[in-house]
Image: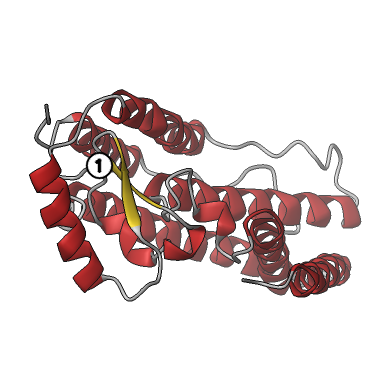
Amino acid sequence: MTDPSTTAAGARALLFLCLAALLGAMLFAVNRLMLPAWSLALVALAVFSFACGKTVTGRWLGALIDERNVISLSRFQAVLWTLLVLSAYLTAALYNIFSGQTLPLKIEIQEELWWLIGISTSSLVASPLILNTKAEKVADATEVSGTFSTLQRQNETDSTPATKGHIVVNTDISGARWSDMFTGEEVGNAAHMDVARLQMFSFTIITVIAYGVVLGHMFAGDLSHGIASLPTLDKSMVALIAISHGGYLSSKAVPHSLTGA
């Protein structure tokens, strides 16, 4: 078991690191070095997320772990976009403030970006609602036994899987692994890869990287007229993200397990 004093000390150290990164971002913004300012703002917000996760759950990745004690793909995506957009807005606001722009906080976030954030939030909210209906069902004992045997061979962890209706859960938060984002959640598919999840993860990573590069190019460019808006996303990319989320939620909603007596 993790020593609470060690956890608290680690969280305090991360908090100081977060504050140092924010201070560094402000100093770079004062000197009009906006690319390193944005990088530090992104680091500061990420460190804050890790510190919160460690403080609340005892694990650095606690912000990504849901009520089933698994790493959630919808949480992962929501956290990524939150860190990226908030760090960009903060950096743009710092630049406008320190460069003496009129209405420095008037920074437009384009409609397509709002749609993308809304889609991510919808999946985050809808996922547990879908799983709650399956948690009320009775799992087939033979299928449970077969799935658990497979999971125990696959997982190098001391955590023991359990069921809540048709849903497979970890009995301890230490059982959360990165591979949780790509496997099913039910007794019938928990030991198998979910292609809909792989697709959504791929679209998310590609879009986040592409948008991050655009943000980096903006902050490294000519900002003499101030930053009036964040870069927009192409509507076709937002449509692809929406389709991948639709597939993800549809796959989650479809029954994958046998019902027991």
- Quarter of the picture holding the C terminus: top left
Instruction: Classify residue 146 by image quadrant.
Output: bottom left
In the rendered image, residue 37, in percent from the top left (x then y), is placed at 74, 68
Q: Which residue is mark 1?
A: 244
The type of colouring in the image is secondary structure
Q: Is residue 152 positioned above or below 226 on the image?
A: below
- Quarter of the picture holding the N terminus: bottom right
Residue in view at x 20 percent, y 57 percent: 148
In the rendered image, residue 83, in percent from the top left (x then y), is placed at 60, 54
Observer-nearest of 35 and 171: 171
| Res. 193 visible in picture | no
Residue in view at x 38 percent, y 65 percent: 178
In the rendered image, residue 15, in percent from the top left (x then y), is placed at 81, 66
Observer-nearest of 58 and 195: 58
Local SS, label 1: helix
Residue in view at x 71 percent, y 62 percent: 51
Q: Is residue 216 positioned above or below 256 on the image?
A: below
